[in-house]
Image (tube, grey):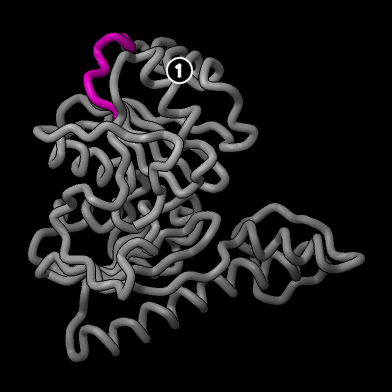
Amino acid sequence: MILSLDIGNTHIHGGIFDGDTLRLQFRRATHPIGSSDEIGLFLRSVIRENGYDPALVSLVAVCSVVPPVVYPLRSAIVKYFHIEPFFLQPGVRTGLKIKYRNPLEVGADRIANAIAVTHLHPERDVLIVDCGTATTVDVVTARREYLGGAIMPGPTIWVDALAGKTARLPAVEITRPEAALGRSTVESIQSGVYLGQVGAIRHLTAALIAETFPGKRPMIVGTGGFARLLEAEGLFDEIVPDLVLRGVRLAALLNHDEPKQADATTAPATF
């Protein structure tokens, strides 16, 4: 079995793969991360309590955009699973041609998404919309080229910014509004945040398609924690919530015949 971990700014999203099948998914808050013992005990416990044997984990694949988590996480995996984890980081094989001006700047989660879509939809032009703490739109060609994309604040950041930077606007639940016209402050914020994200994603995808695939219609794949919330808006051709987990697993398998020793004190979390 392979344990895949997506370390995001807000949540740790984990999954257990048995072959190509994702058998188990779990989440926990990224912060506070806790000690290596706390992380290791959590991982073993969540696997065991869901009916799987932690001893059967033969490979651990990690995608992280939070550098301070790398050291305790690696220590936890080495101590509690007796495995040197694979980190998706510069220097590993991805099967992609990364066309970013500086490949070191690309988030590992964006690379993992790109790896996964080239496996799920080979020889297709794809836009990936990842709706999480940040909303990212990435462009991958049928020739397995990662071209880049766009980044903007996700819904949670919008809500936190309004609550933190104004005197009287509250933090609200992020939900689909019943109408665009809000008749209370809460409804007005919910309308602005939800429909603002919808409009921004629709405009960004249209602009990127016009620039990179003129005259073509690439596939648009949604992923991330808020993708299902936006499902009814017709923004995506397909939603794959576990895209990062699938991508980092594929990267680990691609590099497994040449295992790399991750230096947890310096291992980069971005491409």
Residue 219 is drawn in which quadrant? bottom left
Location of mark 1 (residue): 46
Q: On the picture, is 133 further left or further right than 108?
A: right
Magenta segment boundaries in residue numbering: 53-60
Magenta span contains residue 169: no
Give the SS element for disc 1: helix
Q: Which residue is at 14% across, 65% downward?
A: 144
Q: Residue furthest right?
A: 167
Q: Quadrant of the N terminus?
A: top left
Question: What amino acid is at disc 1?
Answer: Val
Q: Position of residue 134 (x, y in %)?
A: 52, 61
Q: Quadrant of the C terminus?
A: bottom left
Magenta span contains residue 57: yes
Q: Residues within 10 Å of mark 1 (few under 14, many from 20)?
A: some
Q: Which residue is at 37% across, 86% downward?
A: 207
Q: Position of residue 190 (x, y in %)?
A: 69, 64
Residue 166 versus residue 11 in the image, above or below: below
Q: Position of residue 264 (x, y in %)?
A: 41, 34
Counting every numbered tag in the picture gives 1
Q: Nearer the viewer, residue 271 or 43?
A: 271
Q: Nearer the viewer, residue 205 or 268?
A: 268
Residue 235 is drawn in which quadrant? bottom left
